[in-house]
Image (cartoon, rainbow, N blue to C red):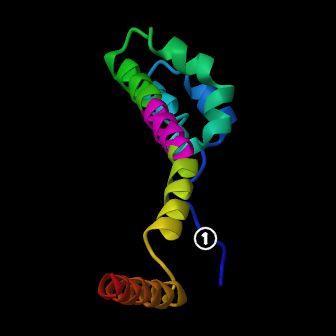
Amino acid sequence: MGKKQRRWARPAVNDVVRDLQASDEVRRGESVRSFCPCHAGWEVFEQHVTEVLHSLKDGSRVVRAHALHVFDDAARMQSVDDLHYSLEPGEKKLDEKRACSRFRSMEERVEARRDKRLRRHKGRHEWHRT
């Protein structure tokens, strides 16, 4: 079985940085978009975040839209990761609590029934004695 291939190939960073200086706005926009963390990964995005920031001030509307998309995706990915990070310990505690308090093992159920019957049986005999 071969290696699992990524949906999008990681961009050649040197080519992308060089394309940021191109005169064609479509080419600049595509090069900014290749820094998107969902395509390039967090490391590449963090290394070149200043280039993406400068692209937000580009004269071309296309380039600015691509730069905004990159930051939007980064913010969404970060908030989803933060959400998963904050929920994991709580979910584990809830699962442990549910397992401990709500559900009894079969032995515990049988013992509880037996104790209940004994209490009921003792209560009847106590009532008849008086």
Residue 58 painted magenta: no
- How far from the left and from the top, in percent, is residue 108? 52, 84
Q: In the shown orientation, is residue 71 left or right of residue 46?
A: left
Q: Can residue 21 be seen in this snapshot?
A: no
**Dot 1: what SS?**
loop
Which is the main secondary structure of the residues drawn in magenta? helix
Magenta stretch, residue numbers: 73-86
Q: Is residue 77 magenta?
A: yes
Q: Residue at x 62, y 38 (%)?
A: 42
Residue 5, image x and y in percent?
Answer: 58, 66
Q: Residue at x 39, y 29 (%)?
A: 69
Residue ID for mark 1: 4
Residue at (69% x, 33% y) in the render: 14
Is residue 61 rendered to the left or right of residue 42? left
Q: Nearer the viewer, residue 43 or 17?
A: 43
Label 1 environment density (alpha carbons within 10 Å; few <14, some 14–19, many ≥20) = few
